[in-house]
Amino acid sequence: MKFSDEARLLIDNWDVYQEIRKTEAELNGKFRDYLFSIENDLQKQSWWDNSWIFTRYQEKQVYLTNKEWHINESPAIWIGVENFSVETILGITDTATMYVWVPGNRTGLVAALRTEISSWNDAQGEVELKQNNSYVVRDTIRKCLPDELDRFDEIVRKPMIDFFNCFGQKKDLLSKSFRSAAGNE
């Protein structure tokens, strides 16, 4: 068997490689816990009340919905963060995204929410323009470069909290759009 120069380098440094893999697994767990801890920050906001539901959907995704925004006992509006991981925040792969999303084929609700949010002067993110898409709003979480790690909360956490605050504070307007469109879904 022939080994490439890269394979030889890896074999020669196998112990270091194993330590890096172990550290990466620990870091992935820390990122998951960091994302999940957003719930505590949100519960301290002035707009938070017992009608809000915070869901840890997957290890890389959380979302917020409201008891008022359910159709057939399923949440019809999600305000969340997806694809949040070591790779997307520190690496070179895709980006983590903050979003307002409507599950299912509820085009009337998507259109009503897009219209409502487009009228705000202080909306966070970009209103989605693609018609065949259930995203209402999307915004990326920018990467944190190695020389910026001391500012990680400012670069990563603050924009997430600001995004949730933007839409949490406007619950009544979102609920009005939901009520007007939900009867037609």
Image (cartoon, rainbow, N blue to C red):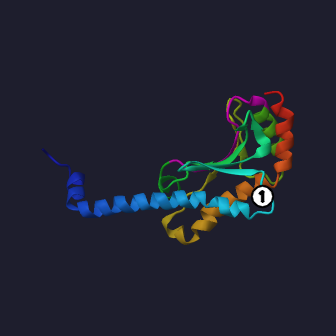
Q: Nearer the viewer, residue 138 or 26?
A: 26
Q: Nearer the viewer, residue 143 or 159?
A: 159
Q: Which residue is drawn at the image coordinates 83% and 33% (left, top)?
A: 181
Residue 138 visible to the viewer: no
Q: Left or right: where does residue 50 sit relative to residue 54?
A: right
Measured from the top left, where is residue 114 in percent x and y? 78, 39
Measured from the top left, where is residue 28 in percent x and y? 46, 57
Question: At label 1, which amino acid type do we have?
Answer: Trp
Task: Inspect the magenta stretch and tell me whether residue 122 lies in it.
Answer: no
Check disc 1 and report the residue beneath it. 48
Q: Which residue is situated farthest in the left direction here?
A: 1
- The local secondary structure at tag 1 comes to loop
Write the start and end of the magenta stretch as one range: 94-108
Q: Which residue is drawn at the image coordinates 70% and 28% (left, top)?
A: 105
Q: Left or right: where does residue 93 sit relative to residue 132?
A: left
Q: Nearer the viewer, residue 89 or 84?
A: 84
Residue 147 visible to the viewer: yes
Q: Nearer the viewer, residue 57 or 86?
A: 57
Quadrant containing the N terminus is top left
Residue 107, quarter of picture: top right
Is 57 above or below relative to 73?
below
Quadrant containing the C terminus is top right
Q: Which residue is drawn at the image coordinates 24% and 53% (left, top)?
A: 6
Q: Which residue is drawn at the image coordinates 49% and 56% (left, top)?
A: 86
Is 138 above or below relative to 104?
below
Task: Inspect the magenta stretch and tell me whether residue 96 lies in it.
Answer: yes
